[in-house]
Amino acid sequence: MQDFNEKFKEMKYKPFTRQQMIDCIEGKGAPRPGVAIGTWIHLDLLSKDKQDVLKELFKKYPEDMQEFYVKKPSVFGEPGDKYTWCDVENADPSIGRTTTVGVDEETAISWEVYDQISKDVPDIEEPDMFCHAPEPDGRYRLAWLSGGPWTRIWTYRGMTNSMMDLYMNPQRVHDINRRVIRFFKAAAKRGVKEAGIDAIGFGDDLGMQKGPFMSKEMFREFYFPYYKELCDYAHSLGLHVWMHCCGDAMLLIDQLIEAGIDVLHPIQKYALDEKKVVDTFGDQLSFWVGMDLQRILPFGTKEDVIKETQFLIDTFYTKEKGRTIFTVNNRLEDNVPIENVVAFIEEAYRYGTLKGAEKNE
């Protein structure tokens, strides 16, 4: 392991140690909000000039944890391809397609195809599952998995079919959920041994812009048991569970907490009322707070970004509990002015440190 103090001695702000991040998540206090942009910025998707700016920025502003993707199973493979979600020959609907479809329907397969998928894929023994894991350096380590069980069914079936499947094909939905949780539990166990992880993360977009995709009762039937099974297992390994959920899932957050989710991302502005979320759930959950990518970061001024960053810190962070880590609310796209990204990250450290220091006075 690299020496923590030596690695970060030239940084403007020293990152959290592993224990400081654990304390932040578990409500035991933090000297400032955490900052971990991580898997939401893919430098290779940005223009070269923006890549260069961010590389220089992260030399001065290190993230407070190490996040990385596990090697993701492919969506479609051929017979014999074990590290895939569908190993049926020529099952990919895009082969030979000449018409345009919605993105959530582009991989939609029939139940006839699904029934041909091997029971042992994705291969939980894939040797390169943790090939993207960085060398440990004293920071907290989060392994980000693939999409969760709700994401998996609409990847298999398309959104339209999936909504109907909850009513028309309930046992098949449960079968998909079991397949996903089997893979996630194996990845969690291997991650502890092979990559020294402290947490797993997955994404399931349960919310639309206003309200969830399903009722509380339907979530309870189809998804709560699998979330709880995963969280219970991860906690038995000493891991936290981080979850990404776009949109307005306010009606489901109590069940996410009951299931054992430790950290929720992004608390989406214009879909959720941040203050209401904190007032209702702030003592039960930690927040990976996402800076807005619908309006403020892409279309706001630098001053707008700074003001919003301060608002988020004032709303979510308390030194005594911590429970706040900052990032963007989804994958950063190239339409965002780089000066706004820089302003957000710099202000998250500056104002967050100031607020932490104020509470010491």
Image: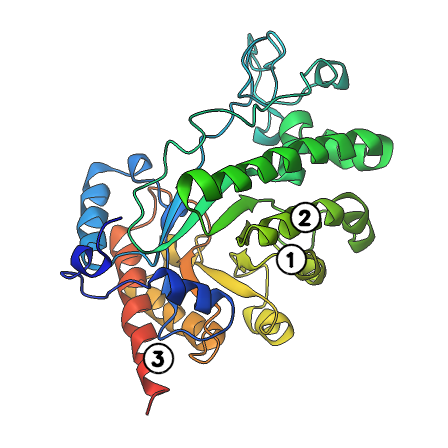
Q: Residue at x 61, y 76 (%)?
A: 279
| Front label number (3 vs 2) | 2
- Amino acid at dot 3: Gly
Quadrant of residue 309 within the rendered picture: bottom left
- Amino acid at dot 2: Tyr
- Amino acid at dot 1: Gly
Q: Which callout, 3 or 2, points at the residue further toward the start of the chain?
A: 2
Q: Nearer the viewer, residue 303 or 232?
A: 232
State how the image is colored. rainbow
Q: Residues within 10 Å of mark 3 (few under 14, many from 20)?
A: some
Q: Are marks 2 and 1 in contact (CB under 8 Å)?
A: yes
Up/down of 305 relative to 1, above or below: below
Q: Name the residue under label 1.
A: 260
Q: How crowded is mark 1: few (under 14 residues within 10 Å), some or many (20 or more)?
A: many
Q: Mark 3 points at which residue?
A: 356
- The CA distance from mark 3 to mark 2 is 34 Å
